[in-house]
Amino acid sequence: MSTIIKPLVDHRIYTIALRKMPEFLDVFNRLAMPVLLETLGHPMGFYTSLVGPQNQFVHLWGYDDLTDYERRGRARDTHPDFPAYLQASAHLITAQETRLIRSAPMPCWSTA
């Protein structure tokens, strides 16, 4: 399996209500993922917290540049099925952090 490095990454952290992670993951998989795959493409990864702040769900999406991020984000936000996910998950998410991070030039590291 090869890793595709994107120059811009949307790094999202959702804090989920206590003991609601299984319900959130179900809602996310059923209602958000079809829309996200259609509008954002394939994610770089999904994670849940193990050490540190608990009840957190992290997902990463790669973009070519800020224009690509904005274009695909608009497609997600205006997708007719996206409001169903937002409504179904509203009581499950207690906080959200969204970061745009960019790749750092590291000449000593190679993906080859």
Image (cartoon, rainbow, N blue to C red):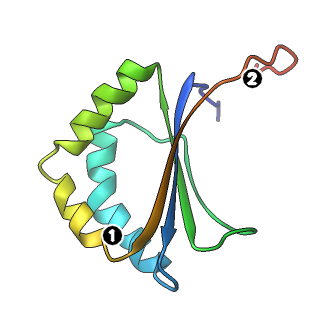
* Residue at the image position 46 percent from the left and 65 percent from the top: 95
Q: Is residue 103 left or right of residue 86?
A: right
* Residue at the image position 55 percent from the left and 56 percent from the top: 58
Q: CA distance from mark 2 to mark 1?
A: 34 Å
Q: Amino acid at mark 2?
A: Thr
- Observer-nearest of 80 and 13: 13
Q: Is residue 77 left or right of residue 21?
A: left
Q: Determine whether the residue tagged by mark 1 lies in a helix, strand or loop.
A: helix
Q: Amino acid at mark 1?
A: Val
Location of residue 22 with respect to 95 vertically, above or below: below
- Observer-nearest of 15 and 37: 15
Q: Is residue 96 left or right of residue 89?
A: right
Q: Extreme left residue here?
A: 80
Q: In the picture, which quadrant includes the N terminus?
A: top right
Q: Residue 48: x percent and y percent?
A: 60, 64
- The dot on residue 27 is 1
Classify residue 112 by image quadrant: top right
Q: Residue 35: x percent and y percent?
A: 26, 48
State which tag comes first along the sequence, 2 or 1.
1
Q: Are marks 2 and 1 in contact (CB under 8 Å)?
A: no
| Mark 1 Cα-neighbour bin, 10 Å: few <14, some 14–19, many ≥20 | some
* Residue at the image position 29 percent from the left and 26 percent from the top: 71
Q: Residue 40: x percent and y percent?
A: 35, 37
- The dot on residue 111 is 2
Q: Determine whether the residue tagged by mark 2 lies in a helix, strand or loop.
A: loop
Frontmost of labels 2 and 1 is: 1
